[in-house]
Amino acid sequence: MRLLPLAWPGPACWAVLAALVLIAGTPAHAETLSLQLRSQRPADASGLRFHTVTQPQQWNAAETVVIVCDMWDSHHGYRAAKRTAELAGPIDRFITAARQQGAAIIHAPSDCVAAYSDHPARRRAIETPRASQFPADISKWCHQIPSEEAAVYPIDQSAGGEDDTPEEKAAWQQQLAKEGRNVRHPWQRQIAAISIDADADWISDSGEEIWSILQHQGIKNVMLVGVHTNMCVLGRPFGLRRMATAGMNTVLVRDLTDTMYDPRAWPFVSHFTGTDLIIDHIERHVCPTIDSVQLVGGKPFRFAADDRQQVVLVIAEDEYRTEETLPPWALKHLGPRYRLRYCFADADNPNQILGLESLEDADLLVISVRRRALPSSDLEHVRRFVAAGKPVLGIRTASHAFEVRGEAPAGSAQWPEFDAQVFGGNYRNHHANDLRCTVTVADSIPPELQKLVAPLSDQPFASGGSLYRTSPLAPATQLLLVGSVAGHPSEPAAWTFTRSDGGKSVYTSLGHVDDFAQDAFAEFLAGAVNWLAADE
């Protein structure tokens, strides 16, 4: 065999070699990530209501990292462990897509990095040159940042957030002990279903190490996935609070996370609604969010046990303060069973209701709107929702939601037939405000609707608002409640309606702020939602 003579490489050869010898963890190519960053801004000066807004951004994948937070192989909570296992596959698909598009991946299984002492991804983190400067307290937990100080934290997690039953907890602790694990801290490494690329990824749970990796790799953008959002994902040294306040473009991947929240604690909503409340808090006070679809396509991940229908509440009226009454009513009465989204009018432009695009994937609409002429594209969201045969609950001024007095703004659209077409109603103004209205249950309620009116069956209901003139109703209505004032014929006050599109509606002319103060009315409205959703 003849050996070719060796020659010292010239400048051209060195250029080729340099192009091939990449920094560990840096992909051979990087793409632009087209993202939709969702955040929430105040709808008014109260600080209680927020508009959901979406901002498109382009991120260079080579300047982006995904941090996988505390996706352990076990947990002291049985249900938490099961949800983590369910979440692992979608997270693995997400980080695989991110890696393929040129992003860096840091696995951060806190307290478990010793299990990876010989792993190339762990050695890569240790050997990364130390950053010359660090943000303040980057090695410490962060429990709050200044933008959160005036906010009310949305859930009570003071007991730890475990949502196991006593029987589940006892059986799970026996199982952990049988496996030789510490029942309070059973995690030993990252869950195996999430792949670690030995040639590209990093493993670290240290704030200073991770910051050094970000600086050494030229990272400007951080995505957080994993558990638990209300604890580790927010508070770890590499968590959302630290990354956002250190100047990184930071997002939570909102469908690839979970909370430690027990529905037996305030505000007594479902576990998954508790997660939604934490995501709302993050979008308002910490950083924006994205969903995994933006990298992997398909539909956002949803836990198998999360069978909630989505209720969108559209609120835009200035007389009856439903912007104050409906959100707490919905959280209390619907939060245990439904996913909730809100759309409010723009304070600077009352004929614009922000967030109506959320109706595109909603299951049920609750509407409390008075005399608004919307941009045509916005009103079209409502039209499509109704045309799809989806259920609608109308509150008081919804009978004249999209019909203004006088000239409508240029480029706007109205729907004067909304009352007749959606509710089978016939709004004809109202009686004088000083005439006290008494509400009673109508005669001949069908058996399948008896439960709906049961909260108001014991005694007459004194409404706080004027009585609407609503008769005669369409033939396809079923009267539920009747309102009466002295010296005038009674009027329908609530009814069901089967629309021409096959959808169901419930409408009530009640909804004054004083009405919501009465438990019977609040329960009636909740029953109407359940009936519309075929939940009962």
Image: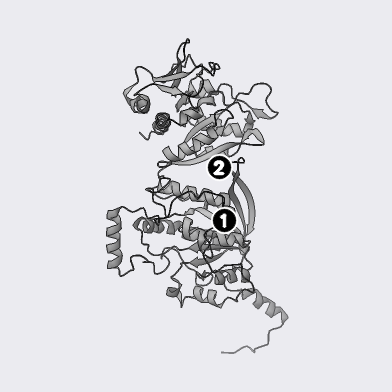
Inter-mark Cα distance, 1 to 2: 23 Å
User: Of all residues shown, which one is farthest toward the right?
Assistant: 11
Which color scheme does this rendered protein use?
one colour
Kind of residue at disc 2:
Leu
| Quarter of the rendering containing residue 478 | top left
- Residue 468 left/right relative to 337: right
Q: Residue at the location (27% across, 54% down)?
A: 167
Kind of residue at disc 1:
Val
Q: How far across and down, in percent of the image, does residue 3 sit?
A: 60, 89
The disc at residue 251 is 1
Tell which of 284 and 216 is nearer to you: 284
Looking at the rendering, in which quadrant would you find the C terminus?
Answer: top left
Q: How far across and down, in percent of the image, does residue 129 sit?
A: 60, 76
Q: How far across and down, in percent of the image, does residue 45 sit?
A: 62, 41
Element carrying mark 1: strand
Q: Is residue 127 above or below residue 189?
A: below
- Residue 15 left/right relative to 151: right
The disc at residue 69 is none
Q: Residue at the location (50% across, 74% down)?
A: 122
**Mark 1 or mark 2, earlier in chain:** 2
Residue 133 makes an appearance in the image = yes
Looking at the rendering, in which quadrant would you find the N terminus?
Answer: bottom right
Q: How far across and down, in percent of the image, does residue 458 sit?
A: 34, 24
Packing grade of label 2 (10 A; few <14, some 14-19, many >=20) is: few
The disc at residue 48 is 2
Tell which of 53 and 491 is nearer to you: 491
